[in-house]
């Protein structure tokens, strides 16, 4: 379907010619450094810019998630000389605020007239909280449907799979749960009919999938709340393509709650035999170590500004 894909996780890569130089006033130049550069700024949120080149040479650009702060993503785009209006469509992996708050800055950067489709699952709007035993629950900020519409975003809600750009990019929609170990997030709750109810599955979790010709599938997740093995299995079932070339994004394996499933998850990924594994965001250091040890030829460490280019055979 696509001969070339470029994705840059959390925000983008070093521009050709280097980072922008900053003027330094007065004695600060001698007191600190001779010249300052304005590189990208990282934070806990996740955002990836995905460029897809089709077989005929056409390019398309997808913004997959938008980060945790209003201005972090857009500020990094400015540092790297990337125009916000080059984005053709926004896909939100799920409704958690560390993946959505940057839509605020994107709207302002576009002059309050976003004019962009935003593809989400209907559960995206749910009011949610994290309820850890012995602690006060943490209520998560919720994206405003009305505010998104008011600034010009075209909201597209679909629980089922969707295609973008002539069926060259697949958005999974709600992911089928098929493993016996990926059971979601037990401490996660949602407000239903005025009462807080367990919401471990986070059904709005969805992934982006591209098929690289003669290479296999590329699967990009935001947090992978559906389970990264479930997600990749579902991508294979939807496309009929068995071979997995690359798995990227957040795998949500950090913290003691998820430690018991790190081993089965790494084993499950290893069984899928991807050539590239790039875990990010909420994957956690223990899972990254195990992935690096068990898949040493596939593992690529990720940080702010990591850029990955994948090409068809």
Image (spheres, rainbow, N blue to C red):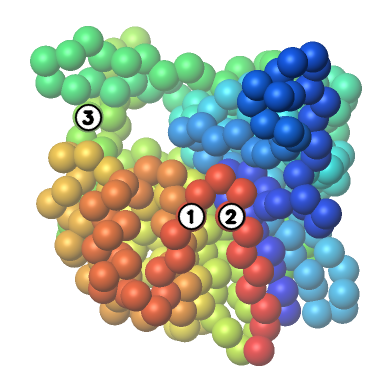
Q: In which quadrant of the rendered image does the N terminus lie? A: bottom right
Label 2 and label 1: CA atoms lie apart by 6 Å
**Mark found first going from the N terminus, 2 or 3:** 3
Q: Residue at x 30, y 65 (%)?
A: 291
Q: Nearer the viewer, residue 244 or 288?
A: 288
How dense is the environment of label 3, judged by Cα within 10 Å: few (below 14), some, or many (20 and up)?
A: some
The residue at which mark 2 appears reads as 306
Residue pointed to by mark 3: 187
State the separation of the CA atoms marked 1 and 3. Answer: 27 Å
Q: Looking at the picture, does residue 194 appear above or below residue 115?
A: above
Q: Residue at x 32, y 74 (%)?
A: 295
Relative horizontal placement of residue 198, taking residue 91 as reference (left or right): left
Q: What is the spatial separation of the Cα atoms under label 2 and label 3, in whole angstroms?
A: 31 Å
Residue 49 coordinates in the image, percent (x, y): 68, 50
Query: The residue tagged with tag 1: helix, strand or loop?
Result: loop
Q: From this viewpoint, is residue 50 visible?
A: yes
The reply, left or right, for residue 104 in relation to residue 298 is right
Quarter-of-image position of residue 67: top right
Q: Position of residue 76 (x, y in %)?
A: 70, 36
Task: Pick whichever of labels 1 and 3 is earlier in the sequence.
Answer: 3
Rendered location of residue 184, percent (x, y): 27, 44
The reply to whether dot 2 and dot 1 touch (C-beta < 8 Å) is yes
Disc 2 element: loop
Q: Which residue is mark 1?
A: 302
| Closer-to-camera residue (251/190) | 251
Residue 178 position by quadrant: bottom left
């Amino acid at each position: 379907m696509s001969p070339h894909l470029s994705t840059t996780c959390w925000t983008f890569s070093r521009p050709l010619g280097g980072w922008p130089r900053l003027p330094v006033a007065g004695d600060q130049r001698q007191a600190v450094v001779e010249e300052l550069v304005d590189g990208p700024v990282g934070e806990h949120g996740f955002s990836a810019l995905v460029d897809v080149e089709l077989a005929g040479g056409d390019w398309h650009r997808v913004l997959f998630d938008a980060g945790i702060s209003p201005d972090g993503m857009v500020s990094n785009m400015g540092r790297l000389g990337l125009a916000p209006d080059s984005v053709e469509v926004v896909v939100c992996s799920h409704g958690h605020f560390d993946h959505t708050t940057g839509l605020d800055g994107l709207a302002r950067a576009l002059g309050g007239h976003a004019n962009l489709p935003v593809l989400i699952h209907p559960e995206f709007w749910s009011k949610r909280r994290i309820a850890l035993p012995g602690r006060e629950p943490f209520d998560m900020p919720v994206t405003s449907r009305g505010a998104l519409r008011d600034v010009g975003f075209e909201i597209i809600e679909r629980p089922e799979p969707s295609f973008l750009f002539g069926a060259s990019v697949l958005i999974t929609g709600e992911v089928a749960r098929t493993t016996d170990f990926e059971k979601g997030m037990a401490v996660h709750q949602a407000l239903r009919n005025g009462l807080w109810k367990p919401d471990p599955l986070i059904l709005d979790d969805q992934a982006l999938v591209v098929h690289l010709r003669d290479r296999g599938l590329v699967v990009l997740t935001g947090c992978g709340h559906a389970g990264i093995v479930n997600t990749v299995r579902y991508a294979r079932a939807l496309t009929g393509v068995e071979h997995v070339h690359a798995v990227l994004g957040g795998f949500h394996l950090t913290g003691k709650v998820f430690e018991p499933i790190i081993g089965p998850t790494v084993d499950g990924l290893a069984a899928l035999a991807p050539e590239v594994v790039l875990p990010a965001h909420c994957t956690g250091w223990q899972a990254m170590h195990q992935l690096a040890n068990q898949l040493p030829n596939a593992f690529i460490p990720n940080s702010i500004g990591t850029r990955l280019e994948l090409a068809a055979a």
